[in-house]
Amino acid sequence: MKLRLHFVVDPMGWFCISTVLFIWLYNSVFIPQLVLLPHFQEGHIPGALVVSYYLASLLCVTALFRASTADPGRLPQNPHIPHSERDQWELCNKCNLMRPKRSHHCSRCGHCVRRMDHHCPWINNCVGEDNHWLFLQLCFYTQVLSLFTLGLDFCQYYYFQPLPRADEEGFTSRHELALLRISTFMGLLMFGGMSNLFYTQITGILADTTTIEKMSHFLDEINQPRKPWQQTFAEVFGTRWKILWFLPFRGRQPLRGHSFPSRV
């Protein structure tokens, strides 16, 4: 599958994604330096905990990079419309191009996106049919990393014994408490915000509707039977294999020709 990078020229989006990257970098540098590595060297925590933290950090930043640079489903200027599917297309009144139903025109990006959920400034990209699965992974792994960080901050405050440091005049040694407080604040902020967003996304997928459709009450016009949850998630992630739903290191193809048991 050919990898296509998609960049949106938006100064506000650049600021937002830079903020997210700063928070990730802060917790991926200072927390291991203050908590993980010193206590691992003293034998207080197992190596598996260190590996798990770095793995969560890697999955989080990979999902962020791919969600922000993946094509969300931008429609070409002259799309090929099969004759049998012409009744499923409509004319966009903003760009005057044909688009599939349930597509939406993003005023910030200036083009139509297939099954667009919303435009997210925090990834500086639209969330659409082709990168929705990456956005879900980003929400999930941000919660995991934030919860991991909050747990380590709590243990450093109340559980772990103070460790002797060779460099007592170093920056991290002199400002350890302040650095941990900043980490705790950012962890609470990210976990709370992402938990609410993740819940909204999951309920939308289960209802087979997008955020834009919820806001515009378009769902009442769709009038389709509700799909099984396995099918809705498989369509978003592009595969029936549930283990692959958690891996950002892969491509995605539209899911076609698969059947699922119906709801009772």
Image (tube, rainbow, N blue to C red):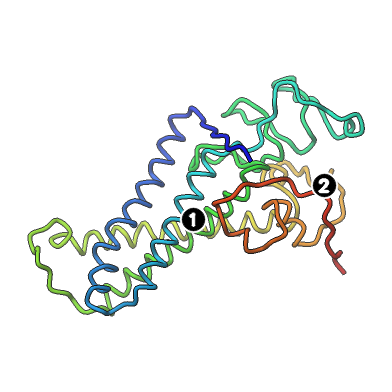
Q: Is residue 205 found left or right of 63 in the rendered image?
A: right
The residue that label 2 is drawn on is 220
Structural crowding at the residue carrying mark 1, measured as other residues with C-alpha within 10 Å and reported as few (<14), some (14–19) or many (≥20) = some
Q: Is residue 131 found left or right of 79 in the rendered image?
A: left
Residue drawn at (32%, 59%) of the image: 183
Residue drawn at (39%, 61%) of the image: 54
Q: Are marks 1 and 2 in contact (CB under 8 Å)?
A: no
**In the picture shown, does residue 32 fall above or below 103?**
below
Structural crowding at the residue carrying mark 2, measured as other residues with C-alpha within 10 Å and reported as few (<14), some (14–19) or many (≥20) = few
Instruction: Kindly state the secondary structure of the residue where label 1 is placed.
Output: helix
Q: Is residue 17 found left or right of 86 in the rendered image?
A: left
Q: Residue furthest left?
A: 169
Q: Residue furthest front?
A: 1
**In the picture shown, does residue 38 fall above or below 160?**
above
Residue drawn at (29%, 58%) of the image: 182
Amino acid type assigned to the residue bearing label 2 in the image: Asp
Distance CA(mark 1)–CA(mark 2)? 29 Å
Residue closer to the observer: 4 or 231: 4
Q: Residue furthest right?
A: 84
Instruction: Provide residue 73's location: percent of width, then percent of height.
Output: 66, 36
Amino acid type assigned to the residue bearing label 1 in the image: Gly
Residue drawn at (27%, 58%) of the image: 30
The residue that label 1 is drawn on is 193
